[in-house]
Image (cartoon, rainbow, N blue to C red):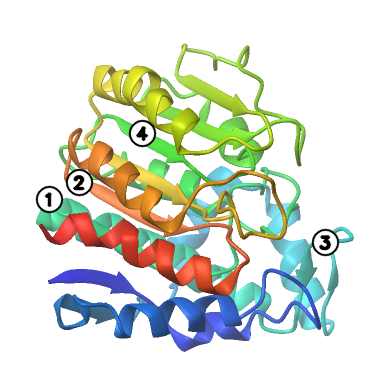
Amino acid sequence: MFPVIYSDEFLDHKTGYLHPEKPERLTAIVTALKEAPFASDIEWRVPTPPQEQTLMPLLEKIHTQRYIYKIQQIALSGGGYLDGDTLVSPRSYDVALLAVSAWLDGVDTVIATSNPAFVLARPPGHHAESTVGMGFCLFSNAAIAAFYALKQPGVNRVAILDWDVHHGNGTQAIVETNPQIAYCSLHQYPSYPGTGRATERGFHNNVLNLPFPPGSDISIYQPAFEKKVVPFLSKFQPDLLIISAGYDANADDPLASINLQPQDFGLFTEYCLGITRKILFGLEGGYDLSALGQSVVATIQPCLA
């Protein structure tokens, strides 16, 4: 069985009319998975309700108390904006904490089984920095999960692969000072948020950024995986591989100009399985609903072989 960690509560993060990061993203994925040929092999798991006495110390190692309190207060006051694109609705603080808890559940599941799992949660996280949220993101889910994983027995190195079309500036900024964490990002450049140059290598040569020009497709991505991504991650020998699984690099996506197809993400998964089966997938971007659902199905399919 393949674990998918999901709750309808993730739909309660309301972003407003016509916002691309909308609840329908999750319902589209759920529908696609329930209609997939392997639907009977999916084990739907509800995330553990967040326990603030245990979650907050971990969260406060990644984000400042002032920033966490800000998100909470905006939600309590009825909602508002962190920036022009990043909204906090009345339930967003609670939902964001549940999303973090789901990512931690994912870490526990993968470590316990030595097999992949998928966290189907929102809001996304890879743009969230320690002191500020941006780019639709509130808390830095992947980075939090990585630091949490390092506290678990037998986990000494964690790698994060970010195939979202946008560079995960928040994730990189948080993890690049830790030699036990490697970060690799494939992204359109130039594009939001303007970071992710190939010259950014981290404090311990633990960062690999692969910026691609608009119009790039699998003929560009596949050699990059074979010649750069796989060697980089294999050399690091991670005890856990976390994938910031964004799907806005699809050709049909309205927010970027990369020309991947849904099946290409299945190929990416195959490369990753060649490195380790201890893989945690966690949803980031992806805003064309049809391509998004198809891409998640393609991502999971190789894990069942």
Whether the residues at callouts 2 and 1 have beta carbons within 8 Å, the answer is yes
Packing grade of label 4 (10 A; few <14, some 14-19, many >=20) is many
Sequence-wise, the earlier of marks 2 and 1 is 1
Q: Is residue 279 left or right of residue 290?
A: left
Q: CA distance from mark 4 to mark 3?
A: 29 Å
Q: Please give the name of the residue rendered at 26% of the width and 39% of the height, measured from the top-left corner.
A: 272
Packing grade of label 3 (10 A; few <14, some 14-19, many >=20) is some
Position of 304 relative to 42 (above/below): above
Label 4 sits on residue: 159
Label 1 sits on residue: 114
Packing grade of label 2 (10 A; few <14, some 14-19, many >=20) is many
- Dividing the picture into quadrants, the one containing residue 49 is bottom left
- Can the viewer see residue 121 in this picture? no
Quarter containing the N terminus: bottom left
What amino acid is at disc 4?
Answer: Ala
Sequence-wise, the earlier of marks 3 and 2 is 3
Q: Secondary structure at mark 1?
A: loop
Q: Secondary structure at mark 2?
A: loop
